Image (cartoon, rainbow, N blue to C red):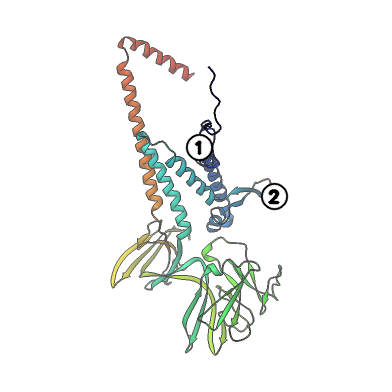
């Protein structure tokens, strides 16, 4: 009996095998969640950490972190010094920030979303969450962390911290011979103007705008007659900005740039140099440039950004202890008083024992160079860190540790349970045979 021919309208297509028709999206998800990718990323992270540690001896901590773990560069070139080679070996690698970002995605997709949800794996799931939290804390720290210093002698009180990295342009109007209304141009509008880049900053509240160019992170102001420019740097009033390539300690970097005042009702004035360094012009005055526009007097200067704190800190005592017959510090200690709403709280800040309050952490960084000299006024410098993720790494370590320990105990209990079950179900008549067989296996393994 022959089957009737099927009509084209009633013809049904065969079911498509879902496993054979993998879309690009499913392939991408599978690749991002693979154990192979996790292994490769962990090896890359280990190499980046090793190379950064070696290069830190030359560049310093901040410059190394900026090079190896910045989100601005997808790829970086690592330098490895080999003893028998005159030139360092240049190794191109994926930037550390992006390696951690990929590892975060890998753990999230593979260890959380696609992982099998089984009761016996609940603590592995918890450990993965702890690692994700740790990576997230590093990202939050890099984006939102602020670092600064507080410098004061005994008895002094301060409620401001000087930022480590950010240089700003400060414009102050002078009335009655004193600076009054301050206008600050933040570092994000200044510190990216490297090379020949120029930016005009509009100042609607002032009778002029300002043009900025040629910013140098770590600069020296050089006399063009005594030290002629070697790379055709711009010379202004007999001086030019020399951009030093050494950037070992970020807080000691001295920024500088060229500036030009653009009056809104008159022609532009000649360019000048502004710098955070104390710098003497031929006239003997410090280079906080003074301009007169529409009969008003302004000064233009460059400084480190100052951020206010919601309370004040007074240094009551600064104590430094050195190892015998050396200048190597054994311990630094500052006793401070925190003043807030007419309430005073005394706290001790020591090396590795910071003070935490109001989302800020105060570390003992250094003492003044003259601290060990008799008759010198005790001087202390505190490092102030404002970081919303300050304690997150510690919390993540607790989560990871609890997860791994509990998973180990769970697996150990299951192992003992299954072993006892097999032992109880075994026939006692076969116990001697089992005992001598185990001894034979041990002897083979030992040989």
Determine crowd level at label 1: few under 14, some 14-19, many 20+ residues with C-alpha closer than 10 A: some
Q: Is residue 8 visible?
A: yes
Of residues 15 and 31, the one drawn nearer to the viewer in this rendering? 15
Q: Which mark is residue 86?
A: 2
Of residues 280 and 418, the one drawn nearer to the viewer in this rendering? 418
What secondary structure is marked by label 2?
loop
Task: Pick whichever of labels 2 and 1 is earlier in the sequence.
Answer: 1
Residue 121: percent from the left, percent from the top? 38, 35
Of residues 356 and 399, the one drawn nearer to the viewer in this rendering? 399
Q: Is residue 329 left or right of residue 70?
A: left
Of residues 381 and 428, the one drawn nearer to the viewer in this rendering? 428
Query: Relative to 306, is 385 above or below?
Result: above
Query: Relative to 151, is 39 above or below?
Result: above
Mark 1 highlights which residue?
Answer: 35
Q: Is residue 286 visible?
A: no
- Give how far apart the Cα atoms at labels 2 and 1 are: 39 Å
Determine crowd level at label 2: few under 14, some 14-19, many 20+ residues with C-alpha closer than 10 A: few
Residue 234: percent from the left, percent from the top? 68, 73
| Residue visible at 56% across and 57% down in the picture | 72
């Amino acid at each position: 009996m022959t089957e009737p021919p099927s009509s084209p309208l009633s013809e049904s297509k065969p079911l498509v095998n879902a496993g054979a028709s993998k879309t690009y999206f499913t392939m991408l998800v599978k690749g991002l969640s693979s154990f192979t990718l996790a292994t490769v990323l962990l090896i890359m992270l280990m190499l980046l950490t090793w190379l950064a540690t070696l290069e830190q001896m030359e560049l310093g901590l901040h410059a190394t972190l900026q090079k190896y773990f910045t989100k601005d560069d997808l790829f970086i070139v690592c330098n490895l010094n080999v003893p028998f080679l005159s030139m360092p070996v240049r190794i191109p690698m994926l930037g550390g920030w992006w390696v951690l970002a990929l590892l975060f995605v890998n753990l999230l997709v593979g260890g959380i979303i696609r992982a099998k949800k089984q009761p016996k794996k609940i603590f592995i799931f918890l450990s993965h969450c702890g690692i994700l939290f740790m990576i997230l804390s590093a990202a939050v720290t890099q984006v939102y962390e602020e670092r600064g210093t507080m410098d004061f002698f005994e008895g002094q009180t301060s409620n401001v911290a000087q930022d480590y990295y950010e240089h700003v342009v400060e414009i102050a109007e002078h009335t009655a011979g004193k600076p009054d209304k301050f206008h600050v141009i933040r570092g994000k509008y200044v510190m990216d103007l490297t090379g020949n880049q120029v930016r005009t900053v509009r100042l609607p509240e002032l009778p002029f705008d300002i043009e900025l160019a040629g910013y140098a992170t770590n600069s020296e102001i050089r006399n063009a007659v005594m030290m002629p420019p070697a790379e055709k740097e711009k010379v202004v009033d007999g001086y030019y900005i020399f951009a030093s390539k050494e950037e070992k300690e970020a807080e000691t970097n001295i920024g500088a740039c060229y500036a030009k005042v653009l009056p809104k009702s008159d022609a532009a004035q000649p360019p000048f140099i502004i710098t955070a360094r104390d710098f003497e012009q031929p006239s003997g005055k410090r280079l906080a440039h003074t301009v007169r526009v529409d009969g008003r007097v302004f000064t233009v200067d460059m400084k480190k950004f100052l951020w206010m704190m919601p309370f004040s800190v007074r240094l009551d005592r600064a104590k430094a202890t050195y190892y015998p017959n050396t200048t190597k510090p054994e311990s630094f200690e500052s006793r401070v008083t925190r003043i807030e709403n007419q309430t005073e709280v005394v706290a001790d800040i020591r090396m590795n024992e910071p003070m935490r309050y109001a989302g800020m952490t105060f570390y003992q960084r250094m003492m003044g160079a003259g601290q060990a000299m008799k008759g010198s006024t005790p001087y202390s410098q505190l490092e102030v860190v404002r970081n919303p993720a300050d304690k997150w790494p510690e919390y993540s370590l607790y989560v990871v540790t609890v997860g791994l320990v509990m998973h180990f105990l769970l697996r150990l209990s299951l192992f003992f349970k299954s072993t006892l079950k097999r032992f109880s179900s075994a026939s006692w008549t076969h116990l001697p045979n089992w005992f001598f067989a185990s001894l034979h296996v041990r002897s083979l393994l030992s040989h």
